[in-house]
Image (cartoon, helix red, strand yellow):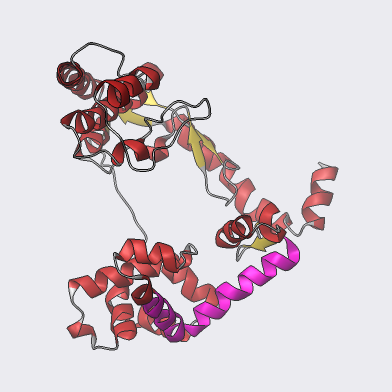
Amino acid sequence: EDVYSFTLQKEDLDSVYRHIELPLIPIAKQMHDDGVLIDVEYLAALGKEYHSELKKIEKRIFKAAGQEFNVSSPKQLGEILFDKLGLKPANQKKTGTGQKSTKESELEKMVGMHPIIEDIFLYREYQKLLGTYIDTIPKQLGSDGRLHADFIQAGTTTGRMASLNPNLQNIPIKTELGRRIRNAFVAPKKSILASIDYSQVELRIAAFLSKDEKLIEIFKEGGDIHRAVAAQVFGVSPEQVDPEMRRRAKVINFGILYGMGVTALKDNLGTSRAEAQIFYDEYFNTFSGLATYLEETKQFAAKHGFTLTFFGRKRRFEGIRSSLPFIRAAAERMA
């Protein structure tokens, strides 16, 4: 206790510990103890459907390959794709052991070359959903039919919570196949599940921390932030902002906060580098308070080796003084 207290005080973290972390312990315990109700019958039916679909896809893959093999084995899959079918992705990558890689990014290069590729993607998705969630969750339930995950307060470097056994923070949402798993999480009779979401919380925090006058003004007026930013950056009235302008403003609004550079912006916007550069510069000219804040944060991290949240939580960055530019850039982005 004494050693902890001394270190916390020396590091100025006593307040984070006493006012944020300690009061959260009973809440995290309660979340674990309460758990979440699972509709086991629904999952069983979904499992049956997905297993049968997986079998059909596997048959199609075998037919396209002209033989049966273990689709989950990178070695066997590689032999089928590269040797037997003769497919060649652009600038092909190899694994550490010199095998031709069959990972996601390599397969993506081959989309459209052969129907087997789409089926392999589908096979992997079904298999992941079954193995990680559908077949596994029922085995993890308590005697009360509820799922009791562990919530880890110190599970991330940023101060976010993590959860384990199972991780409830990555239940799929991107595809319809994955989203259907969410229907298994239910409320008991006479209760409801509520979904609560802050509106544009990152940008609000950015406005608050950077004290950027234009950004604060937009929030105070209570309009659509992406539309308002687009109006500022493109120099038109909010009524003249079309969906494409708004989409671009949204990309840069979130991208800038996570240290997106001009190259990443170009890829995300699907424009030329020159156009992305103009957009980037225009954004920072408009929101100069935010630009200054981001620059000062990098300089602070370079000088002290860490950054601070508003409440004083510290995150250290090993690579901030690295002589290798890409390591330093990565540290700056995280800072």
Frontmost residue, 34 versus 60: 60
Q: Main secondary structure of the magenta part?
A: helix
Frontmost residue, 268 versus 238: 268
| Residue 229 screen position, x and y as percent | 33, 79
Whether residue 54 is in magenta: the answer is no
Q: Which residue is depicted at the point 68% across and 51% down? A: 17
Q: Which residue is depicted at the point 27% across and 44% down? A: 174
Quadrant housing the C terminus: bottom right
**Given the current orientation, which residue lies at the most extreme top position?**
68
Whether residue 294 is in magenta: the answer is yes
Quadrant housing the N terminus: top right
Residue 281's quadrant in the figure? bottom left
Q: Is residue 16 left or right of residue 12?
A: left
Q: Is residue 133 left or right of residue 311?
A: left
Above/below status of 158 relative to 132: below
Q: Would you say residue 310 is visible in this rendering? A: yes
Q: Which residue is depicted at the point 32% across and 74% down? A: 225
Q: Which residue is depicted at the point 23% across and 84% down? A: 238
Highlighted magenta segment, given as a residue range = 277-305
Q: Is residue 190 left or right of residue 331?
A: left
Residue 310's quadrant in the figure? bottom right
Give the mark count. Answer: 0
Q: Would you say residue 315 is visible in this rendering? A: no
